[in-house]
Amino acid sequence: YVSAQWISLWEMAVIFSPIHPTLVIIILIILGFVLFRKRMPKVEIV
């Protein structure tokens, strides 16, 4: 049963492995966009 859990965890890791970097990039883009939006009013760019 323990080996079955490790196999399932390994399969999940393989499944999420290629998606993880993409999620990191998307999160960085979203964070950058939010920070840019927050800085906009301070700079008051028309």
Image (tube, helix red, strand yellow):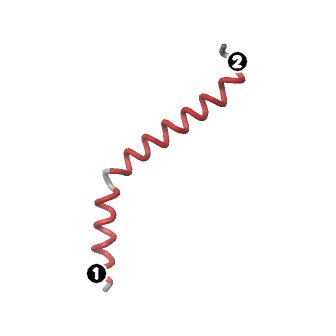
Q: Quadrant of residue 11?
A: bottom left
Identity, as a three-letter code, of the amino acid under mark 1: Ser
Q: Quadrant of residue 24?
A: top left
Q: Which residue is mark 2?
A: 44
Q: Residues within 10 Å of mark 1 (few under 14, many from 20)?
A: few
Q: Residue at x 30, y 59 (%)?
A: 15
At mark 1, the secondary structure is helix
- Residue 41, compared with residue 23, is above or below; it is above
Circle 2 residues within 10 Å: few <14, some 14–19, many ≥20: few
Q: Residue at x 66, y 15 (%)?
A: 45
Q: Amino acid at mark 2?
A: Glu
Residue shown at the point (27%, 74%) measured from the top left: 7
Judged from the image, the secondary structure of the residue bearing numbered disc 2 is loop
Which labelled disc corresponds to residue 3? 1
Instruction: Name the residue: 33% across, 70% down.
Output: 9
Q: CA distance from mark 1 to mark 2?
A: 59 Å
